Image (cartoon, helix red, strand yellow):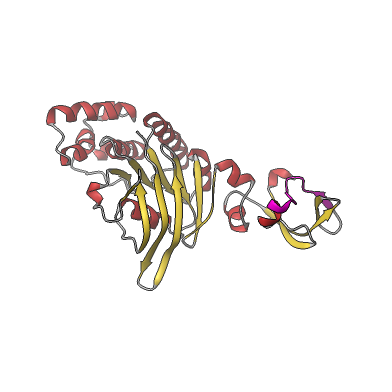
Amino acid sequence: MSVSIDIDNVVKKYGDNTVIKGLSLHIRPGEFFTLLGPSGCGKTTLLRMIIGFNSIEGGTIQVDGTVINDIPVNKRNMGMVFQNYAIFPHMSVAQNVAFGLKQRNVPRDKVDGMVDEILKVVKIDHLKKRMPTQLSGGQQQRVALARAIVIHPQVLLMDEPLSNLDAKLRVEMRNAIKHIQQQIGITTVYVTHDQEEALAVSDRIAVMHDGVIQQVGSPKSIYQRPANRFVSNFIGLSNFFKATLRNEGGRPVVDFGSYREAMDNLDLSAAGKASGVQADGSAVTVAVRPEEF
């Protein structure tokens, strides 16, 4: 059964430097949720707070309704795939995948069957006797993924798992990861700085900047309706134009000076005004995607 993750007003500090600033998120059961942002935005720090590698200076993290702030890493029942894979070079594929099971004292007669089953899921069962030095980058990534999910964790965490692969293999592996995640139905939190990758694999995305969530939504909603200039500029390409927003007979119109465009997707009702839409001659910035010209 898939679990939810609730992050409530969490804070992370390094000395006097606050890198996560009262951040809150709800991740749904079975969801492929991506933390997306530039280097240094706090996405990996947040991931490490979820698994327990980093302490929490404020707020709470709950998994399936249980606060996990003070639960040790080895008791959180989470699997993690690291950027550098962290595969043991002296162990075969099967031995690497079996490592977590043996640490959990799974009976020996069950280990082999569980390893064989998960190797079939990630499609490397024919490589079970090979050593890591005999594997390609994509195959090593599948070993790391198999090792993370064979223990049947509640949550799967992935920290930039494709960054060491070439462009063609990245596309192949991101499709494989998404397929496997859907197949097993595990709640997954995925970290990347690659917006194309995030748009391709995610159910929802949280765009981060300077330790703050800028927007949460589906890939389509974030691309088509960015919450602010940062999101618009970070997700895809945008052209920015200065304009004035006017109300012409109850219809919102963007006035560029020599050109005017009706904006029927804007709401001028009380609800619309409450959300910041003010068609009263206010100066606005209009973002236009290249494909919209």
**In this orientation, does residue 123 appear?**
no
Is 255 rendered above or below residue 292? below
- Percent position of residue 171, x then y: 47, 37
User: Which quadrant would the C terminus be assigned to in this image?
Assistant: top right
Q: How many marks?
A: 0
Instruction: Judge from the rendering whether residue 13 lies leftward or rightward of residue 224; answer left or right.
Output: left
Q: Quadrant of residue 280?
A: bottom right
Q: Quadrant of residue 143?
A: top left
**Residue 269 on the magenta span:** yes
| Rendered residue at 31%/60% (across/down) | 55
- Percent position of residue 117, x then y: 27, 26
- Percent position of residue 195, x then y: 52, 47
Residue 76 versus residue 122: which sits nearer the camera?
Answer: 76
Q: Quadrant of residue 89?
A: top left
- Percent position of residue 127, x then y: 27, 29
User: Which quadrant would the N terminus be assigned to in this image?
Assistant: top left
Residue 87 versus residue 133: which sits nearer the camera?
Answer: 87
| Rendered residue at 82%/55% (across/down) | 247
Question: In the current view of this chain or complex, which residue is farthest to the bottom?
Answer: 16
Question: In the current view of this chain or complex, which residue is farthest to the front?
Answer: 270
**Residue 71 on the magenta span:** no
| Rendered residue at 45%/51% (across/down) | 25
Instruction: Judge from the rendering whether residue 208 lies leftward or rightward of residue 230; answer left or right.
Output: left
Q: Which residues are magenta?
A: 260-271
| Rendered residue at 21%/30% (across/down) | 129
